[in-house]
Every structure is written in structure tokens, then in C-alpha cells.
Image (tube, rainbow, N blue to C red):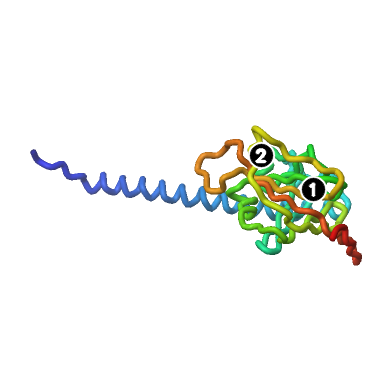
């Protein structure tokens, strides 16, 4: 049997196709990165306008969400804008506020959710006594310390909304390294408020 040898023209065509596919993949990756960077710039601008007194500032005209807080975890170098709502389309751009819980800065338990492989991947590294700071739309900074971390099966249990003490609960899917998304397990970080800082004053709220 005589081996079939590809012609130079066929080889050139294959090379062009491979190069086109490679450039398309690189371009798609760069677009996703650029879009993410642009979103962060727009979120920061919306947050600045919120602190200036505007209400429900949409980061882009077609957005169905708006900033309701700014979350910092100094031990992990985390600084995130918190968006209203815990829907999938919202969580693509940042952590979301669960509207069934207390609004950031008000009395009770505030629940924030985020994706385990992006904005809330750092939850796995938080330890008891780590500090978390939540800046509110009024410009106050509420300081929390991590009280406990744990795993909850949401098909059998729910997160308690305690109105007697100001708490911050951060929730993401579990396990962190899972390839297939979904499932009933959630990783939960519970933090208790220890101080409220507004302007030049800091008020201790617990020992």
C-alpha cells in the first residue's frame, strides 16, 4: 500500500486552521479577563456614587443589581463589592446579599453568598478570630471576627437568622475542589460583630 502524503497546500490549510483556533481561544480568554476587569472598575464607581448618597446605583445600564456593601478580609487580601441579591447572574460579578437576611449594617444576621471557585474561594482559608470588615451604604465600617466555620447540608438544615446579636454569615458551595457544580453541601463562615467604626468614632459592640 502506497502511503498517502499530505500536499503542502493541505498542510498549510491545517496550520492556518490550528492557528485560527489558537488565536480564537486566546482572544476569548483575554475578553473574559478584560470584561472582569471592566466590571470591577464599574462596580467601584457605582460604590463611590452609593457612598455619595445615590440609591440603587446600577453599575451598568442593563444591570438588575447594585452595590449594598464592601467586604474586606485583611488576612487574605480580599476587597470585594457586595451586590444586592444572591442570584447566579449577580454572583458572576461579586458576592451577593441574601435578601431574606438582615440588610448590611442593620440589626441581626446578614448572609452573603458567593461562588467557591471565584470570589468566595478565600473562605476555605479563614480561621477563627480572623477579622472581616463590612462597609455599609451609610459609610460605617462594621468589624467582625470569625467565630466558627462548618459544613451544612441545606437539604436537612437551614442557617439560623439570629436577631439578638449582629452576625455576618458567608456561604459558598462545598467541597471547594469539586468538578461538578451543585449539591446540598454549603461551607459556612460565621462571624460576630465586635466594633462599629463611623467617621472618627469606633464603638465596641462585644467583648
Q: Secondary structure at mark 1?
A: strand
Residue at the image position 36 percent from the left and 45 percent from the top: 17
Q: Is residue 120 left or right of residue 133?
A: left
Question: Residue 26: x, y in percent?
Answer: 47, 52
Quadrant in which residue 76 is drawn: bottom right
Which residue is more in the foreground, 122 or 151?
151
The residue that appears at 61% across and 40% down in the rendered structure is: 185
**Does residue 23 appear to the left or right of 153 in the view shown?**
left
Q: Tell which residue pokes out farthest to the top in this image.
A: 155
Q: Which residue is mark 1?
A: 68
Rendered-image quadrant of the N terminus: top left
Q: Position of residue 12 (x, y in %)?
A: 29, 48
Q: Which mark is residue 127?
A: none
Q: Nearer the viewer, residue 76 or 145?
A: 145
Query: Which mark is first along the chain, 2 or 1?
Result: 1
Is residue 114 something that shows in the picture? no
What is the crowding at mark 1: few (fewer than 14 residues within 10 Å), some, or many (at least 20)? many
204, 140: nearer the viewer? 204
Q: Position of residue 2 (x, y in %)?
A: 9, 40
Neighbour tally class for label 2: few under 14, some 14-19, many 20 plus, Cα within 10 Å: few
Instruction: Name the residue furthest left.
Output: 1
1 and 2 marks in contact (CB < 8 Å)? no
Q: How many marks?
A: 2
Q: Relative to residue 26, is residue 160 depicted above or below? A: above
The location of residue 51, given as percent across then percent down, is 84, 54
Gap in Å between the C-alphas at discs 1 and 2? 16 Å
In terms of secondary structure, where does tag 2 sit? helix
Quadrant housing the C terminus: bottom right
Give the residue number, with chain letter if any, for mark 2: 89
Residue plotted at (69% across, 45% down): 113
**Could one spot residue 100 in this view of the protein?**
yes
Amino acid at each position: 500500500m502506497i502511503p498517502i502524503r499530505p500536499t503542502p497546500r493541505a498542510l498549510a490549510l491545517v496550520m492556518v486552521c490550528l492557528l485560527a483556533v489558537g488565536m480564537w481561544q486566546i482572544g476569548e480568554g483575554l475578553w473574559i479577563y478584560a470584561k472582569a476587569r471592566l466590571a470591577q472598575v464599574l462596580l467601584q464607581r457605582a460604590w463611590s456614587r452609593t457612598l455619595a448618597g445615590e440609591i440603587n446605583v446600577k453599575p451598568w445600564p442593563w444591570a438588575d443589581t447594585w452595590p449594598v456593601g464592601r467586604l474586606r478580609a485583611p488576612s487574605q487580601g480580599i476587597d470585594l463589592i457586595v451586590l444586592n441579591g444572591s442570584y447566579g447572574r449577580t454572583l458572576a460579578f461579586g458576592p451577593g446579599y441574601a435578601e431574606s437576611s438582615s440588610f448590611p449594617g442593620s440589626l441581626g444576621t446578614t448572609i452573603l453568598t458567593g461562588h467557591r471557585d471565584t470570589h468566595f474561594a478565600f473562605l476555605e482559608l479563614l480561621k477563627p478570630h480572623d477579622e472581616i470588615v463590612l462597609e455599609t451604604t451609610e459609610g460605617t465600617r462594621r468589624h467582625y471576627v470569625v467565630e466558627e466555620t462548618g459544613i451544612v447540608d441545606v437539604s436537612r438544615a437551614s442557617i439560623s437568622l439570629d436577631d439578638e446579636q449582629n452576625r455576618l454569615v458567608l456561604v459558598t458551595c462545598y467541597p471547594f475542589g469539586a468538578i461538578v457544580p451543585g449539591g446540598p453541601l454549603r461551607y459556612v463562615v460565621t462571624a460576630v460583630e465586635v466594633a462599629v467604626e463611623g467617621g472618627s468614632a469606633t464603638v465596641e459592640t462585644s467583648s
